[in-house]
Amino acid sequence: MSGSESKAPGSAGGYLLVSAFVGHANAQDDAVERAKLVEIFAFANLGAQPCANALDDASWNADVLKLMFGLKPPLTDAEITLKKKEVLEYRSRLGEAQWCELYAVKMHEGHLIFTATTNH
């Protein structure tokens, strides 16, 4: 995974994600990246308590939250609500144990994106 990071002009330390997954920017890539971030955030929101023991590193969830709150433009309630419905469907199909494993994968992905885009 390659990533780049730049401070958004006038944003109080917010990060503008550019090509976190592919190394070049275009509108389609930005939409794919944004959809991935919405999915990761939906998992973080729904799985933080029931799946806390599934994480190898408890800081992953915090990294995902820092990433989401620094995203410019911010994720919308509509984006998050729609994705949360899909994520809940995964949960009912997979069962709690497998869903928590998937949650851990999503939190690790979010941690990697945070690390790549913030150089932390």
Image (spheres, rainbow, N blue to C red):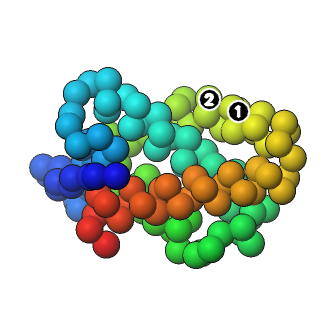
Say what secondary structure mark 1 lies in: helix
- Residue at the spot x=62%, y=29% of the render? 82
Q: Is residue 58 left or right of residue 50?
A: left
Where residue 39 appears, as percent x and y from the top left, is 55, 41
Q: Residues within 10 Å of mark 2 (few under 14, many from 20)?
A: few
- Residue at the spot x=48%, y=56% of the render? 110
Where residue 10 appears, as percent x and y from the top left, is 14, 51
- Residue at the spot x=42%, y=61% of the render? 112
Q: Are marks 1 and 2 in contact (CB under 8 Å)?
A: yes
Residue furthest to the front: 1
Q: Which mark is residue 82?
A: 2
Image position of 15 with respect to 88: above or below:
below
Say what secondary structure mark 2 lies in: helix
Q: Which residue is mark 1?
A: 85
Give the position of the C terminus as an image quadrant: bottom left
Q: Looking at the picture, tell me which residue is in the foreground, 20 or 68.
A: 20
Residue furthest to the left: 9
Q: Residues within 10 Å of mark 1 (few under 14, many from 20)?
A: few
Residue 45 shows in the view: no
Q: Which mark is residue 12?
A: none
Where residue 12 appears, as percent x and y from the top left, is 22, 59
Amino acid at circle 2 = Leu
Give the alpha-carbon distance from disc 1 to disc 2, as whole Å.
Answer: 5 Å
Q: Is residue 45 left or right of residue 7?
A: right
Where residue 42 appears, as percent x and y from the top left, is 60, 45
Image position of 55 with respect to 29: above or below:
below
Q: Looking at the picture, tell me which residue is in the foreground, 22 or 31.
A: 22
